[in-house]
Each structure stands twice: as C-alpha cells, then as structure tokens.
Amino acid sequence: MSDKVTNILLVGVGGQGILLAAEVLSETFLLAGYDVKKSEIHGMSQRGGSVVSHVRYGKEVFSPIVPEGEGDLLFGFELMESYRCLGLLRPGATVVVNDLCIAPPAVLMGHEAYPENLEAKIAERFPDLILVDGQKVAIEAGNARTANTVLLGAVSKRLNIEEKYWLEAIERMVPKKALEVNLKAFAAGRALA
Amino acid sequence: MKEILSGNEAIARGAYEAGVKVACAYPGTPSTEILENIVKFPEVNSSWATNEKVALEVGIGASFGGARSIVTMKHVGVNVAADPLFTLSYTGVGANGGLVLVTADDPELHSSQNEQDNRNYAKFAKVPMLEPSDSQECLDFTKLAFEISERYDTPVFLRTTTRISHSKSVVELGERVTGLPEPKLVKDPAKYVMLPGNARGRHYVVEERTVQLSQDGCSMPLNRSELRDRKIGVITAGVSYQYVREVLPEASVLKLGMVHPLPHQLIRDFAAQVETLYVVEELDPFIEEQVKAMGIKVIGKEILPICGELTPGRLRRSFGLPEEEETQVEKLPGRPPNMCPGCPHRGVFFTLNKLRAYVSGDIGCYTLGFMPPLSAMDTCICMGASIGMATGAVKVLPPEERKKVVAVIGDSTFLHTGVNGLMDMVYNQGAATVIILDNRITAMTGRQDNPASGHTLMNQPSEAIDLPLLCKAIGVKNVRTINPLDLAECEKVIREEMERPETSVIITDKPCVLIKRDGVFEPGAVLEVHSENCTGCRACLKIGCPAIEWVPSSGKRGQAHIDPLLCNGCDVCSQLCKFSAIQEAKK
C-alpha cells in the first residue's frame, strides 16, 4: 500500500445525489482497508446551490478537505460546476464529468448565458477527460435513475481499487430492490472509461 | 467495529455509549444531525426544545435529577443559552448527572450570520472545553467530557467546527456503559439555589476548579506533545491540527484536546523544547493571547488569518511554503441557493417587493427572500429579531414611513424567540405588521418538527400550537390567515394590514414542499407554457422559480419554459401571466 493519499472532489448541484455518491466512495475505500476522510458543507447548499464533496483515502489521512491544487480526480455531476472547480486540481489530474448542463438562476431568468464549449475548455487544461452521458447510458442499462451509478462506474476504472470492493459497497448502500439495475449501470459505466 | 461517521454522528454515538438519558437541542447548522442521530437510540429521551435556552434548562433539570444529559446547538445558539450557562458553571452538575454542552461553530460562515469563536465562552463562563479533531475524537471526547463533568462537578463544553461536524472519518465503536445509578431527587439548596449568599461561595469553588483542571490537564492524554523536528513547534487543536500535520509533517506539535483551561506547565515544557513556537488556530487568537500572557514568545495571527476558516492552502501561504500554480477559469454565473419550486414563501416576498415594504427579516429559508428577483428583505440579525426590530423602527419613523415596516418570521423562529417580541409589540402598542410564514416545519436546517407541527422528535403526536389563537391570547386584535399561493389575496390583505395603525399579524397557511409526512404537502397539477399564447413578456420570471427557464431561442423574442420534473403546481406563475399562457399540463 503506497503512503500517498488520493484526493477526489465530487462537484455538482444540490439535489443531484452527490453526497450519496461520496458515501459509496468512502465505503469502498474503507472496505479496501484504507484510512478515509470525507468533507462537505450541508445547509444552504441543499437549496439548489453548488455542492463540493471532498473524499481522501490512503494509509493515513490528515486534512478532511483536499489541499488546494492537489486534487487527483474530479468527479463532476454537472459541466459548469466541474469547470468552476478546476483550480482545486493538480496538473495532469483526471476529470470524469457528466454531460449535463443545469442552468443557474441568472441563466434561468435570461440575465446571463450558460458558458459554451466547456468540454473543450476542460480538455485543454486536463486532457485526461472522460465525458459520460450518464442519463443516456443509464437508460440503455435499464433505468434512468441510475445515472450516478454509471458515473461511479467510470470513476472506479481510474482508481486503483479492486472491483469487488466497489460491488460490495454498492450492495451495502443501495436498497435491495434497486440493486440489480445499479450493478448493471455500474458495469456500463466501467466499460466507458 | 469500524464505521465511517461524521463528527455529529460520532458525538451521538459517544453520548449513547456514555449512558446519556436525555438529549435536547434546537436545530442549527452545523449541529443539527447530532440529535437526529441520538434519536435512533430508544434508550435516550431526545427532544427538540423551543430554543437553546430551554434546551439547556431541560438538560440542567435532567442533570440535577441524576442523569447524564447532552445539549447541542450551533455557535449563536449559545448566545441564547448563555443565561443559564453562566450560573450552571457555579452550581455544577447533579450527582452522577454529567452535562455536556456541544457548541458547533461555523468558521467561514457556511450557514450562519456571524463567525463568533465560542472558545471565548469557555473562558468567560469558566467552563472546561474539549475540542476534537476528527470523528474518533468526537466519540472519545464526548465520553471523556461526561467523566470530567462528574469528576470536577462542572458542565463541560464540547466544541466542534463545521469541518469537524460534517466531515466523516473512521471510528471504532464501543458499547453503552451500564450500571449508572438510577436518577433520584437530591435536595442541596446551598449548591443549587443561586441566591447571592450561596452564589458568593460557589464562585470560589469555580475558581479553584479551573486552577485544578489547568494542572490536571498537563497529564491528561487528550493533551499530547508530539516531538519531531525541534526547529518548528506548533500549538494547535481541533481541525487545525489536521492541517498542521498535512502541511508541516515534520514539525513538533502540542495537540490540545482541552482548550480551556490551558495546561500551563505542558505549554511551558513544549515551548522550551522547540526553537520557534507557533499557535495555529482558526478565528480568534484564543490560545495565542494566553500563551503570550504567560510570557512565552509565540507567532500566531501575525501570519495567520483571523477571519474565515483555515485550509491546507491558506496554512501553506501563511508559512510561505511553495504552492502549485492554480488553474484559472473565467468568472462564471453564480449558483446561490434558492427557494424550492412551489415554496409557499415566494408569493409573499413577491408581494412585499411590489408593495415596497421595509422588511424586517429573520432566520430561516425565507431569508432567501433577500435574493433577486424577489429582493424583499432589509434586515437579518438573529433568531426572533424581526419583530422587536420592527417595533423599534416604528417608534422613530414618521407616519408615512411607519406603514412600510413589515416583520417576517417563520413558525419555528416565531416560537423560538419571536413570540416575546410580539408580546412586547402589543404591550407597547407598536403599529407594525407581522407576517408569520407558517410552513409547519423548521425547514432551513432540514425539516425538523417544532411545537406548531404536531409531532415530536421521537415521532410522537403532540398538541400543535394554534398560532392564530396564541396571537389573539397575547392581545393582537387583528389576526388574519391567508393562502400565500394566492397573489391577489396576499396583496389585498398585506396592503390593508400595512395601512392599519396598530399591531397586526398575518399568518400564511401552506406547508413546506419538502415535508414528507403523509397528508401535509400535496403538490398541485404540473403547469406548462402554451407557446402560442406566450408573448415573451417575462412576467413569470419575476418570482425566480427554479422550474421556470427563459429560452431565448423560442418564439419571436424568447419564451418561458416550465420543467415538468421540477414544477410542484403552486400556480403562482400562472397568476402573473396576463395572456393565459401558463396552464395545467396535458397528461
């Protein structure tokens, strides 16, 4: 086991299920025998605001938040929020991002425009970019509501953790009746990265 | 057994393991989840109090009755609970009735109106304070706090910050302690009746206790000296300890688990062993000033920020360490929090904006009425302040200005401390309008029940306070209930009451859309925009509903679109449309 701590940032919009995804990541790393810390801000962010969750794992983790400029992997649930957080990443970091745009209030009201070409702008700075149409792949895999699990599958491929721990964590965290569709969605996501 | 727990979950677990019998709180970010987790243990009587002062008094009663009790609140909640706290310090706790008061501070103001450093309360009230730096310590220190409370006959503070409360880390669980003595009544007036004659003597006890704790703290394992490279020595506590270990892995560290009273001899010994001594702490120079007062040379706020929370990057910068060049991105549209689609507050704030009211605001989801396009809040100070401040404003304003003053307050905040303000307004004949936004829940902190919702924290049915009757009982002659989703009714009633030269109360009667309990919130029919009728006038955008999107490419000059997955069918937008373009969606 290497001493180096791996830093993951999960970003998106309140209500997208980011906190639950961060729970699954943390559980996986615990099962794989690592020390884990996870941090996020509740409260106001639940009302449709920006959400950032930090997950760190390694032999021994100190800070619960990812040191600025040391993020190894960005797990983005929405394009603009992912782009907004690029400053937290180290050069050469991996970006796995959902191909989804959610308009913030100023855009909904027609006062500002949603930024364009975000995929290209991210790829220019972070070439290891995996853009996943979570919703589309989830529908193909059988259930539109498993988009986050598809993304998780793609993320899992870029982290050096045995697949069995991911499956065990999903089994623990997902309700029984939704387990099968989630495992399918996870496999579909894994196949993408 | 190992689990990943948040600081709040770990405190709840620690309280359970410590044999706590009573847990009481008023919700407040970042402390709320402590009680929401303690209530999962049926052995503990858990309850939401009407406010933090009452919560602490309930805890004191349980302690004097001989049971361990825990009381939790956010940092500003301690301001409300300060009155019993300072005298509780004198009485000490009941026999076998340890009392732990959790203060969850919020450096960076993630969800608060100020970033006060409540370590000052420990020194001010002369109450020991423990400060955990991860979830394992949250659990361990909670148990330890009860032992210290009973051994030294004192309430004990447990202080967290947002990054401790809401961060998760690995925790080893233990078992609940058994065999604690059964609660019983003990009469000891000299200790528990704080008349001057008794309290004078207790003050000496408090001062001796503090000196004793400062000495004993030098050998308590929760204060520990970690000697590594002697060039740099850092005194630190709480989450700052983690940042120090992250950024200065070679430095020697004196990690304080008890931040009040400070272990003076331990600090002197540590200072003597290192070349340059630093204190790394968030917010106030609380430890630093005391170390300086001991005559020890130390560097602190000369290099560290006093405002905001620390981060590894900020600490790095303070110590002049090299940093990675940050990837720059251009300014992006912000994504502030917003009221939910169908929120019953939206129409009220739209109306207040339209009537050009001066809105004396309060604390809750409705504080978001400040945000554009509603832009209808002029003040926000603390829980319950809206009503008293409205009373003060109308005392000084000329008659035409006076009419504009409207206080807005939620049901939970009204019952917290607002009702006292209303009694004062009526008693002193304040001519302002008060709107109680009764959505049947404490929404902002995540839907906690309150005395007006008819249910307790332990999910028992309870008598729901009748707000109109309460207002009438304290002497308000003009009490009107309105449907906040009916804009015409809102405007008519609010306008009439603003004109009235005496106290009036308007109560809205629609529930929070997030309430999950059956039969409380029922969504209306989903709406849609008929593009053949939509002229692109943008009237529907004036309420800032997240379900309504402006599509510039649609129609001649752009048109509105309603997201059917987000719409809760409140119908407020359709009342703004003069062209009947917003109608029930075809199924």
Image: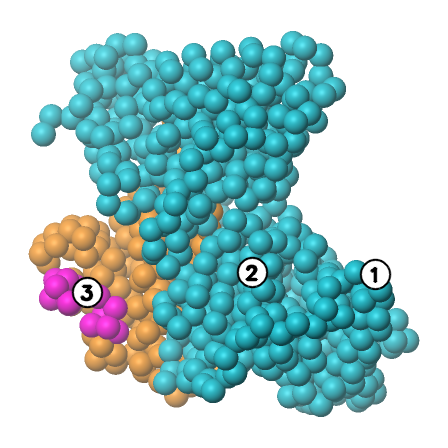
Q: Secondary structure at mark 3?
A: loop
Q: Secondary structure at mark 2?
A: helix
Nearer-the-camera pick, A66 or A144: A144
| Mark 2, residue position | B58
Quadrant hosting residue B170: bottom left
Q: Are marks 1 and 3 in contact (CB under 8 Å)?
A: no
Q: Which mark is residue B295?
A: none
Q: Which residues are magenta?
A: A169-184
Q: Are marks 2 and 1 in contact (CB under 8 Å)?
A: no
Ranked by sequence position, the earlier of labels 2 and 1 is 2
| Mark 3, residue position | A175
Return the residue found at the far right: B295
Q: Is residue A178 visible?
A: yes
Q: Which chain is orange?
A: A
Q: Which mark is residue B196?
A: 1
Amino acid type of the residue tagged 3 in the rendering: Pro
User: Is the residue A131 above or below the residue B410 in the image?
Assistant: below
Q: Which chain is cyan?
A: B
Q: Residue at x 34, y 55 (%)?
A: B460
Q: Residues within 10 Å of mark 1 (few under 14, many from 20)?
A: few
Quadrant hosting residue B90: bottom right
Q: Residue at x 14, y 62 (%)?
A: A178
Asked if both marks, 1 and 3, belong to the same chain, the answer given is no
Relative to B49, is B37 on the left or the right? left
Q: Nearer the viewer, mark 1 or mark 3?
A: 1
